[in-house]
Image (cartoon, rainbow, N blue to C red):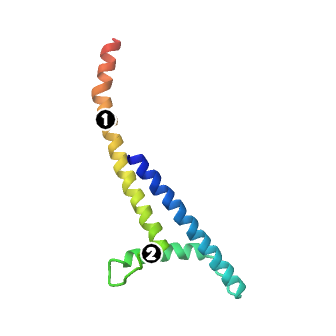
Amino acid sequence: RMFESMDTLLTRLRTGLSEQRKRSSSVARSEKSQGTINFDTATATTTNAAASTSSSSSSTSVPPDDPDIAVHEMAQKIDETTHHLTEHLMAHLDKEETHCMPLVVKHLN
């Protein structure tokens, strides 16, 4: 179940990042056709998303359907899920080392 959840989150993140890249490309093409070139569009978009998320707890309101915010939130969920998954797997590994391995050693001797 945890792995399925992680797979879903990663798929949604990949989709969001792909959409973000497409938007950045179209903005850069639009600026180029207008005679203004912004070489750092992708970085600016990512930076603005992080800044918007940070300020969302203050009085400034961020629209919930903002794709940049959705990507940032998805990355945070993946980080949290990875942390919980790591703890879960380490607990099982510890059980195997403390309970199962001594039984294996005992029966092999």
Q: Is 60 displayed left or right of 13 in the figure?
A: left
User: Of the residues tagged 2 and 1, which is closer to the observer?
Assistant: 2
Give the crowd class for mark 1: few <14, some 14-19, many >=20 residues within 10 Å: few
Q: At x 32% / y 77%, what residue is drawn?
A: 57
Among numbered discs 2 and 1, the one appearing first in the sequence: 2
Q: Classify 10 Å Cα crowding around label 2: few (below 14), some (14-19), many (20 and above).
A: few
Q: Secondary structure at mark 1?
A: helix
Residue at x 63%, y 79% (from the top left corner): 27
Residue 9: x %, y % from top left = 45, 57
**Residue at x-position 53% and y-position 60%:** 14
* x and y percentages locating residue 3 in the rendered image: 42, 46
| Lateral position of residue 100 relative to residue 35, left or right | left
Type of amino acid under label 2: Asp
**Residue 36 figure quarter:** bottom right
Question: From the image, which quarter does the C terminus lie in?
Answer: top left
For the residues labelled 2 and 1, the Cα–Cα distance comes to 42 Å
Q: Which mark is residue 94?
A: 1
- In the rendered image, the residue lying farthest to the top is 109
> Which residue does the numbered mark 2 point to in the structure image?
65
Q: Seen in the image, is 106 located left or right of residue 24?
A: left
Dot 2 lies on which element? loop
Residue type for callout 1: Asp
x 58%, y 73%: residue:
42
